[in-house]
Amino acid sequence: MESIIEHLGTDKFWRFRIGIGEQREAFTIKRVKPIDNFVLGGFSEGEKGKAREIIKKSVKAVQDALEEGLEKAMNRFNTK
């Protein structure tokens, strides 16, 4: 994020967080594989289907934000 902000010269832009990993408590992080492999590695067989679902949902969230406004999209898609 720091690099993007530096290159754009602003931090005033929409950010969409997308993830497929397990939800973890803030203070109990259990790593199954090294973080660089987790972030930069490919999807496991079990994650591939979930990744497709998340990508479709993410596209819909961006479309809704552009058409209806960011706040409405956030209310619709930000769930736990």
Image (cartoon, rainbow, N blue to C red):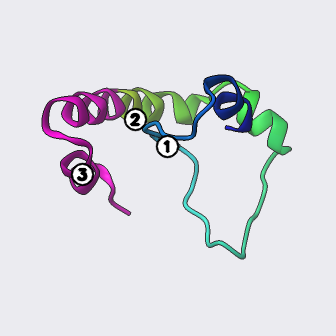
Specify the quadrant that holds the C terminus. bottom left
Specify the quadrant that holds the N terminus. top right
* Up/down of 45 relative to 14, above or below: above
Cα separation, mark 3 vs mark 2, equals: 20 Å
Q: Position of residue 13 (x, y in %)?
A: 46, 36
Count of marks, rendered view:
3
Per the rendered image, the range of residues in magenta is 56-80
Q: Nearer the viewer, mark 3 or mark 2?
A: 3
* Up/down of 52 relative to 11, above or below: above
Cα separation, mark 3 vs mark 1, equals: 15 Å
Magenta stretch: helix, strand or loop mostly: helix
Spot the residue most to the bottom: 27
Compare marks 3 and 1 and give the one earlier in the sequence: 1
Residue 50 in the figure: left or right of residue 74: right
* Up/down of 18 relative to 7, above or below: below
Q: Nearer the viewer, residue 32 or 9?
A: 9
Q: Nearer the viewer, mark 3 or mark 1?
A: 3
Give the class, few, some or many, for how many residues have Cα within 10 Å of label 2's Cα (few <14, many ≥20).
Answer: some
Q: Nearer the viewer, residue 45 or 1?
A: 1
Mark 2 secondary-structure assignment: helix
Spot the residue most to the left: 68
* Up/down of 71 relative to 27, above or below: above
Q: Position of residue 49 (x, y in %)?
A: 44, 30
Q: Which residue is mark 3?
A: 71
**Amino acid type at image mark 1:** Arg
Q: Nearer the viewer, residue 76 or 11?
A: 11
Per the rendering, the mark at residue 54 is 2
Query: Which residue corresponds to the image point at 65% horizontal and 34% vertical from the top-left?
Result: 5
Q: Which residue is mark 1?
A: 17
Compare marks 2 and 1 and give the one earlier in the sequence: 1
**Amino acid type at image mark 3:** Glu
Q: Position of residue 60 (x, y in %)?
A: 25, 30
